[in-house]
Amino acid sequence: MPELPEVETVRRGLQELIVGKKFVGVQVYESPKSFPNTMSDARKFLINAQVVTVRRRAKVLLIDLNSDYTLVTHLKMTGQLIYVSPQQRWGAGHPNNSFLHELPDKSTRVEFVFSDDSHLYFNDQRKFGWVKLVPTVEVENIDFMRRVGPEPLEDAFTAQQFILRLRRRRNTTIKAAILDQTVLAGVGNIYADESLWGAKIHPATRVRDVSDTQLTKLLTEIKSVMILSIEKGGSTDKNYRDAEGRKGSYLSFARVFRREGKACPRCGSVIEKLRVAGRGTHICPVCQKLPVH
């Protein structure tokens, strides 16, 4: 699953490439689950509509149209978006040869055609991703959108709000709490480990045992690692590529994630891997100690 910074790099790439373009065609291949919309709706609200902007909410892409509809897009594990024009080729998503080969290919689920003869291909090997055409005013009422928590990178999201949301999970481990998408949007396993290391909090610590000062520091660390990851084009070196089709490089800057057996960059102790909240978890046993009761 792509993490928030990966999806944000895709959003930025699409924002540069497709805003202002007009849809003149759509072709659905093989899997109607990938584009669960009627062709009647596509003709009414997609064809001849222009792209107004490309937004992101958590890990979901939102392509707003001047028809007052939005293409709500989730790439899931193996989704790709590949833009092809006579002058340019751009790809983002799960890395395979589709970035280079002629399209459509066997993984293409939906092909969008613009009036300037450029194309946007939605590819998905495992068919878990989807593109849904939804009235823009209804996007916020989608079940996922109603449940997902605030964006950690929004200026309006404060430490006080973060603390209040986490206190509702007082008996939960801190890692499980920040991974909960209803508490906070877009924090995945990599950024949880990195930010908890930065704040010197053991991931298995119960929320009730984490002070407000520590939680404030934790939010600062979450924002910091996400901003750095966006600058580096994302983190998922195996399954994801950035907006230029290159692999994200954040993991080369990671302090603790996937560094078990190596020295902690802060104290020199050996980083360990354990399981917390059902996930592989990386810690420094010296910098991140469990509270003693």
Image (cartoon, helix red, strand yellow):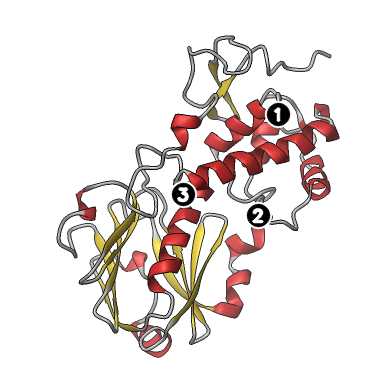
Q: Which residue is mark 2?
A: 151
Whole-percent x, y for residue 209 in the image: 82, 26
Whole-percent x, y for residue 35 in the image: 36, 70
Looking at the rendered structure, the kind of residue marked 3 is Glu
**Mark 2 surroundings within 10 Å by alpha-carbon count, few (fewer than 14), some (14 through 19), many (20 or more):** many
Mark 1 to mark 3 CA distance (whole Å): 23 Å
Mark 1 to mark 2 CA distance (whole Å): 19 Å
User: Which residue is pictured at 40% across the width and 85% down the height?
Assistant: 41
Mark 2 to mark 3 CA distance (whole Å): 15 Å
Quarter of the picture holding the N terminus: top left
Looking at the rendered structure, the kind of residue marked 2 is Glu
Looking at the rendered structure, the kind of residue marked 1 is Ala
Q: Is residue 282 left or right of residue 183?
A: left
Q: Which residue is mark 3?
A: 6
Kind of element beneath mark 3: helix
Quadrant housing residue 180: top right
